[in-house]
Image: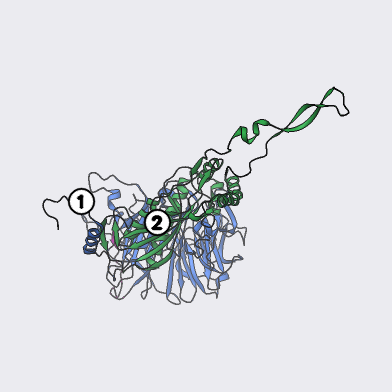
Chain colours: A green, B blue
Amino acid sequence: LNAAPGRAPRQQVRFLPTPVPGGGGAVELVAARVPVLADHPLVRGPRFRKLKIGAGHRLDVKSSGVFVLGIGHGNKLLTGLHNCHLTKVYTVGGLFGKATDDFSDTGNLVEKTTFDHITREKLERILAVIQGTNQKALLMYSNIDMKTQEAYELAVKGLIRPMAKSPPIITAIRCLQFALPEFQLEIHCLHETQQYLRKMVHEIGLELKSSAVCTQVRRIRDGVFTVDDALLRTQWNLQSIQEAIRNCQHKVQTELEKTL
Amino acid sequence: RRGLGVAAGPPSTRQLREAEETAPVFQYAGKAARRKDRVFVWGFSYSGALGVPSFVRPDAGWKKPRRIQPTPYRLETEEKISSAACGYGFTLLASNTRDITKVWGMGLNKDSQLGFQRTRRDQTKGYEYVLEPSPIPLPLEKPQHTRVLQVSCGRAHSLVLTDSEGVFTMGNNSYGQCGRKIVEDEIYSGSHLIHQLKEFDSRVVQVVCGQDHSLFRTEKGTVYACGWGADGQTGLGHYNITSVPTKLHGDIAGVNIIQVSSYGDCCLAVSDEGDVFGWGNSEYLQLASVTETTQVNVPRHLPFKIGKVKEAACGGTGNVILTEEGNVFVWGYGILGKGPNLTETAVPEMIPPSLFGWSDFSPDIRVAHVRCGLSQFAALTNRGELFVWGKNLRGCLGTGRMEDQYFPWRVTVPGEVVDVACGVDHMVSMVRSF
């Protein structure tokens, strides 16, 4: 990063004494644009000595997916994005028939149950109920007075969401794949932790009169950043990072302006 | 297998896997597990209409009387309830069974709208408040063959529709709403009289109670009415009382009506072609689209251009319509469901489907049924969710809050809601468990 060509040094206007053309000992002042010596690379030294990197929404050790980082000025944008309270999308994989103490498949076994009575319709019914109760929680924690006309208009557009701290809320949930004993869900949520999603899988298992553990939690969208914008482990080099920052700048700007 | 001198360490992966494989498997639900049918009630409980006696007279020392049940409460019933109706402070539950007891009632019984409920202490007196679902003895000719199809409740009278023995009416008859001759100074409290109505042109398929009048819809698509008519709600062309069910004419003559609805003093009928007809009270602009008068005593066609209508429901001051595409239209006066600014309109306004859970994520959600209480509305979606809005009189909306609701709000019920009946200050819903 330091080897890249830096900013051009500042210019200043100085009146320098130059000998008058034509000879003679007289000296006159001539204005000239001269680079400021304080900006010279040998005086200033390397431009970057350390970088401030901040992290966005937390991601568990057992989960994977999009993880947003901010560099330098980006840290301030990170706080702005956090205050936007945008939804995150996860793909959660589950397995019927087992219940463990930490709700994932690597925990200590608590119970094994049968699961052949579970069908896709039953699962979708449970998901509809979860979505319904969370929709109510969405309206309640948004702290808007339900009796006003603005509340009605926001509710029609679907823009009501809690803009302050609130318990985890699931805005949308649907089943992507269902092949007993495995299933995969897509969950859109706010203010959640990955352990909450695993607990949700466990509770879905209980509602279906069986038990379930969570095998995979993968974040595929965090606000405006999707998996397509994310950089793979092999792409962690300067050019890709710079390109990624350039691509996202516009999106982040529009999102911040829309909300604040 | 370890020796006595070796310390026990954390179980290795192989030991864990073996323990897991040998763990016992529990079965909570077999392949033949059936979904159970349940009844949930909520609202004002002191009238006994909720059917839970411990709300009114606590049977344990730590229980306190509960005046209002703000969220759905499960009511244990002996049989599967197929039809329910809420009146003004009382409820009727009916089952499709061939047993002798087919109808249960609870709540106010001051006009014998729940039949004669013999008291335990005195064989001649009847209860004025029934706190528990009590069987209503119907004078059936073949009690082990007839089935009860539907029940309906008004202010102080109730109607029971059977499949082969006509309609049974009980309760107050001071305006002829029970379909029998009015007896002056009749004492309705503790009365044993249950009247049977059989003289219609064909089999009756739907009965509807307004506040003080009754409507009967027959198989052929004709509508009969009797009762109080000062607002024209009997639709017979006059404003007098009618004590015998008489056929309606007007704009519905010759039209095959598939649904009738009424709860207050206004009535709506839907034909098989999707047209809406209305008559009765129009003080709240319910029929203002065709007439300026405040009472309409002949059924008039309401020319709404909103598509084919599937179902209509009348409340006290507002009406709601459901079209074939699943859109909900409201008009009238009061809290209509489009925010606090819309309090009255003569022309139906659509409620945006996004308020019922429709979105790009789930685009196949449709409203399947609409129901009306006196000043509340209820809508059921095809996913089994219940949305309510309107005046929250004594907690009848079931949302858990005491404030009025200006736009559709979900009621959390543990199950798929199959049907709901709305009353003045309480509601009853029939739910299938998961």
User: Which quarter of the rendering shows the N terminus of chain A?
Assistant: top right
Q: Chain of mark 2?
A: B
Q: Decide which of B16, A193 is in the foreground and name it.
A: B16
* Residue depicted at x 28% and y 74%: B144
Q: Amino acid at mark 1?
A: Gly
Q: Which mark is residue B338?
A: none
Q: Which mark is residue B9?
A: 1
Q: Amino acid at mark 2?
A: Met
* Residue depicted at x 62% and y 60%: B291
Q: Position of residue B75 (x, y in %)?
A: 31, 58
Tell me whether the residue at label 1 lies in contact with that at label 2, contact meaning CB atoms closer than 8 angstroms: no
The CA span between labels 1 and 2 is 61 Å
Disc 2, SS: strand
Residue A20 on the magenta segment: no
Q: Residue furthest right?
A: A22
Q: Which mark is residue B427?
A: 2
* Residue depicted at x 85% and y 27%: A20
Q: Chain of mark 1?
A: B
Q: Decide which of A244, A14 is in the foreground and name it.
A: A14
Extent of the magenta region: B133-145
Q: Decide which of A153, B161 is in the foreground and name it.
A: A153
Does the magenta stretch mainly form a helix, a strand or a loop? Answer: loop
Q: Does the rendering let one see residue B116?
A: no
